[in-house]
Structures are given as structure tokens and as C-alpha cells.
Amino acid sequence: MWDFETAQYERTLKGHTGPVTSVAFNSSGTTLASCSTDMSAKLWDMTTYACTKTLRGHDHTVSAIAFFPGGDRLATCSRDETIKVWDVLSGYCSLTFSGHGDWVRCLSVSEDGEYVASGSIDHTIIIWKASSGQLVQVEEGALDKPTRLGAHCPIYVTTFSLVIYLHPTLASSATPRTRARG
């Protein structure tokens, strides 16, 4: 951990037994989530710096992690080709999404929490309905170039990073839009 204002080292959070692959703060900054090659995700209380939960359920490296708005759920993706949605309070997996044919490397949750997008090294992007795990749309071969998912859903992606946003003028139609994060 580093102090943002002074750029000084503060502490190391120890708990994973393998390299950490991704981290994310909840919107209030009170909880940090991390994931690792040790097949787990961990939740950290940022006032005590203690690990409060270890989330287990993936069968391989956990590649990325993201909180839903409100911070009550989070999503993880894995080399086991799945995306999981977790309840932060209980630590239990509430949904598992399957549909990729290879390692799922990145994911993002829409600003309204309605959608999850995942990108895989199988060269697909899948948009999922977050509440049910229903597959909304698949785009193949989209990880190496800008592409369009439907008339109102431009996707700009890189292999390792997705950001989803719901364009304000399209909010009533609930069409997810995505763009790459550098």
C-alpha cells in the first residue's frame, strides 16, 4: 500500500500464496478486493488492513476482480473459463457464468450494475445480464480491433482491460456500451 499524497510506502497486505493478478477498491474505499494465481479472491478492511474474507470457488488462476455499484457484490473471472458473482457480506458465490472457450482475462461491471462484460483469450467478448447470468451478446474476434456490438453499443477493447458504461441517452433501453481502458 502506498500513500497517495506522499507517495510513501505504508504496508504490504499479506495473505495470497501466489502472485496477485488484480485489485479493486469498493466505491467508498473501505474495502479492497484482490485476486491471485492461488485460485482465490480476498477482501481487505482498509481501516485495519486485515483480510476479512477469502473467496474460493474457481478451479484455476483468478485473473480480474471488480465491485458492483454499492459494493455489496463483486465479480471475478478465471482461467477456468468462468465468471463468478460473489456476495460481499456472506462471501458466497451467487452466480457462475459459463460461455467462454478459454481463459477469461478481464471483466468489467456496468455503472448501473445491470451488465458484466468479460473478455477471453478465445477472442470473444461476452455481455451478461448480471442478475441472472443470461448471455446477452457475444462478439468474436473483437480483442484486436475496435468493433461494434449492435447499432448502439460500440466496443473498444484491449486483451486485458474492459470498461463498460451505459450512455445516458440509452439508459432507458439498457444497452451496454464499452470502451478500452489504457
Image: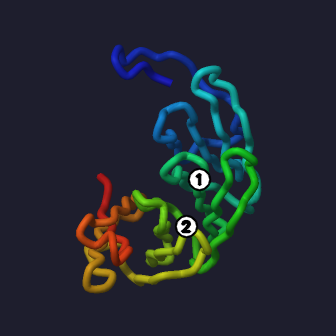
Picture quadrant where residue 11 is located? top right
Spatial distance from mark 2 to mark 1, Cα to Cα?
A: 16 Å
- Mark 2, Cα crowd under 10 Å, few <14 / some 14-19 / many 20+, is many
Amino acid type indicated by mark 2: Val
Amino acid type indicated by mark 1: Leu
**In this picture, residue 168 sits left or right of residue 135:** left
Q: Is residue 159 above or below residue 181?
A: below
The residue lying toward the viewer, choosing from 156 and 105, is 156
Q: Secondary structure at mark 1?
A: strand
Residue 151, position as x, y percentages in the image:
26, 85
- Mark 1, Cα crowd under 10 Å, few <14 / some 14-19 / many 20+, is many
Identify the mark nearer the N-term, 2 or 1.
Answer: 1
Residue 131, position as x, y percentages in the image:
59, 69
Residue 91, position as x, y percentages in the image:
73, 48
* Residue appearing at x 48%, y 76% in the figure: 126
Read off the residue under disc 2. Answer: 104
Q: Which mark is residue 74?
A: 1
* Residue appearing at x 71%, y 62% in the figure: 94
Q: Secondary structure at mark 2?
A: strand
Residue 176, position as x, y percentages in the image:
37, 72
